Amino acid sequence: MSAGLAATAASFVTSRFGVAGTLLGAALTAMIITGGSAILRAYLGAVSGRVRRMPTKLRPRREQQNAGDFGGTMPGRPDLRDNFVGRMRAALDWFRHLPALSRRSILIKGLLAAAVAFVIGMGVVWGAEKVIGNSLSCGLWSQCPPGAVPGIHPAGYDGTGADSSISGGGVNTVGVERPSLIDRVR
């Protein structure tokens, strides 16, 4: 639920970049938040077990490091020199060593949560667009398609705003007869 609301907040901000910004903001935020939290939760669960065992292993390792200076690297891992990429690789290395079923479970749960967050976020965006009678990009930022009037049109009373972002954000044609597909192609 919180990821869905965060995705909604992000879509309000990214609606500045048009309808595509609204949709991408909601989708990417939902995926990053839920996927990141699922992986982080699994990582912290794995680390907490190691932290509980640490005090018994801490003394021998410290004595071993004092006996031989490793020059800023970890023993057996020269790729972990003092650089960001090496540290990030080491931090995420635990995921590769998980059993395949555990990795799949973490990823599937993250994707399902992202999908639910996206649906919640887009539902709130759609509701907000129905209330203001315009797409977010046209109503908040005046980034409108040709023929649409920027601003807030409460509940779309005059039909001059843009359609919702979900339907592509085109010109709202409520009560106006649209030409057939053949006529539009001509």
Image (cartoon, rainbow, N blue to C red):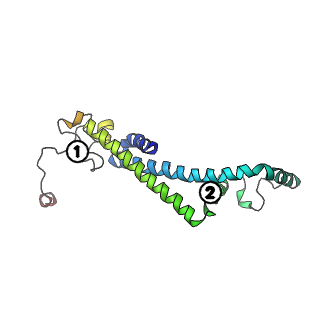
Residue in view at x 12 percent, y 58 percent: 183
Image position of 56 (left or right of 149): right
Q: Which mark is residue 99?
A: none
- Which quarter of the image is occupied by the C terminus? bottom left
Q: State the count of labels.
A: 2
> Where's the N terminus, which quadrant?
top left
Q: Residue furthest bottom?
A: 100
Q: Which mark is residue 146?
A: 1
Q: Amino acid at mark 1?
A: Pro
Q: Position of residue 94 (x, y in %)?
A: 64, 59
Q: From the viewer's perspective, is 64 left or right of 111? A: right
Say if residue 162 shows up in the picture.
Answer: yes
Label 2 is placed on what type of residue? Leu
- Mark closer to the chain start, 2 or 1: 2
Please state the horizontal and vertical placement of residue 23, each as a whole percent of the image: 36, 49
Q: Is residue 33 left or right of residue 125?
A: right
Does residue 182 sit above or below 53 in this rendering?
A: below
Please state the horizontal and vertical placement of residue 116, each as a whole percent of the image. 41, 51
To which residue does mark 2 refer?
92
The reply to whether the C-beta atoms of the residues labelled 2 and 1 are less than 8 Å apart is no
